[in-house]
Image (cartoon, rainbow, N blue to C red):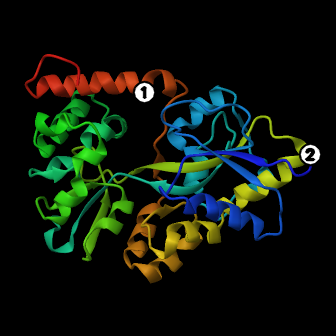
Amino acid sequence: MINSPIIFYYFNLTGTQSYCRLVEDSFHKTGRTRPIEFRSWNCYSGIPKNDGDLYAFDGVVLSALVEKGLLRPVPDSVYPEDVFPWIMEKSLVGGKAYGLSFMLCSNALICRKKDDLNIRNIMELHEDVAIPLRSMVMYYYIQAMCSNRDPLRRLKVMEHLLDLIGGRAFLSESSLADYDGINRFNREECRYFLGFTESIRYFKPDDYVIRFVNFSESSSDNKSLFMADFVSLGIQVPDEKLSDCLALMQIMAGEQFVYDACMLDGQLQYFLPANRCVFPRLTEQAPLYDHLYCLLNYKENGLLRYGKRYYKDFNRQEDVLLQFLWEISGWKSGKV
């Protein structure tokens, strides 16, 4: 059927219904009339059905989705010239591009300008820090693994993170919602906050310093790892939908859509765009974007990706790592 909808599996980037409305409105403003059927999907917890025309997801699962046969390579004709080149170069699977990136995020160490100690790596911190260790432990370990060849140094970094949060009392908290790091930081119970830049929209007005976290003991390692949000073609996209699907992918990776997503509901979201052209416009909203652009416009940056066994291994490895941290904190009985 000519008017059959685009089946779009997505995870909500913003936590509001405005995201789906933005996708739909941006598509239809181009004159295309095909409806979009949105199907919510948590890309971290399970594999979606293979009937999707488009999938939006965190690139940490990219290799796993390709291995499961869900995604179709992107034609060279839709290569996004305005996206930071290192993103596309480092998101290839088997030498092929399987998606277009539209947004980034990374673990950032944030403090008020008045409190800045010019910290160059996580090991230089020796005070209480607001860190969501319980919910982000595997991502921290992956970054520690990429930054340290020696396995013992990786574990030393993880033990240090445990010390920074205050030990097992905080490790036992079950979720980021319980962790309450934003309020701890706002109350100035700690000078440093480890989290994503979008948390800044919940901070009190102030001048903030942002550095992407170095999970090593080196002060010279400035290679940052970023998570990237992708939109990809499903493996079974019918020919009659292909043109509309490719158009929507290009829209989502384009300057206007990314800017609108960063200013969703009229409020600056403090996201990290994958599109370079958006930064001058965002700098007009918040000068710190000029600094963020300099950090992102570095060809040695990397993508945080897991292998094709993500859905088999990730949660199991996370449990093992949490158990290790739990035991070294002094409690040796029971699963975390």
Element under label 1? Answer: helix
Comes first in the chain, label 1 or label 2? 2
Element under label 2? Answer: loop
The one of 284 and 116 positioned closer to us in this rendering: 284
User: Would you say 278 lies left or right of 98 here?
Assistant: left
The residue sitting at 28% across, 44% down in the picture is 215
The amino acid on which the numbered mark 2 sits, given as a three-letter code, is: Met
The amino acid on which the numbered mark 1 sits, given as a three-letter code, is: Phe
Q: Which mark is residue 314?
A: 1
User: Would you say 94 lies left or right of 186 here?
Assistant: right
Eye-nearest disc, 1 or 2: 2
Residue 53 in the image: above or below residue 249: above
Question: Residue 25: where, in percent of width, then height?
Answer: 69, 67
Quadrant in the picture for residue 98: top right
How far apart, in angstroms, are the residues tagged by discs 1 and 2? 40 Å
Residue 230 in view here: yes
Count of labels in the image? 2
The one of 44 and 69 positioned closer to us in this rendering: 44
The residue sitting at 34% across, 61% down in the picture is 199
Q: Residues within 10 Å of mark 1 (few under 14, many from 20)?
A: some
Residue 42 in the image: above or below residue 155: below
Image quadrant containing the C terminus:
top left
Q: Residues within 10 Å of mark 2 (few under 14, many from 20)?
A: few
Residue 143 in the image: above or below residue 288: above
Residue that numbered label 2 is attached to: 1
Quadrant in the picture for residue 115: bottom left
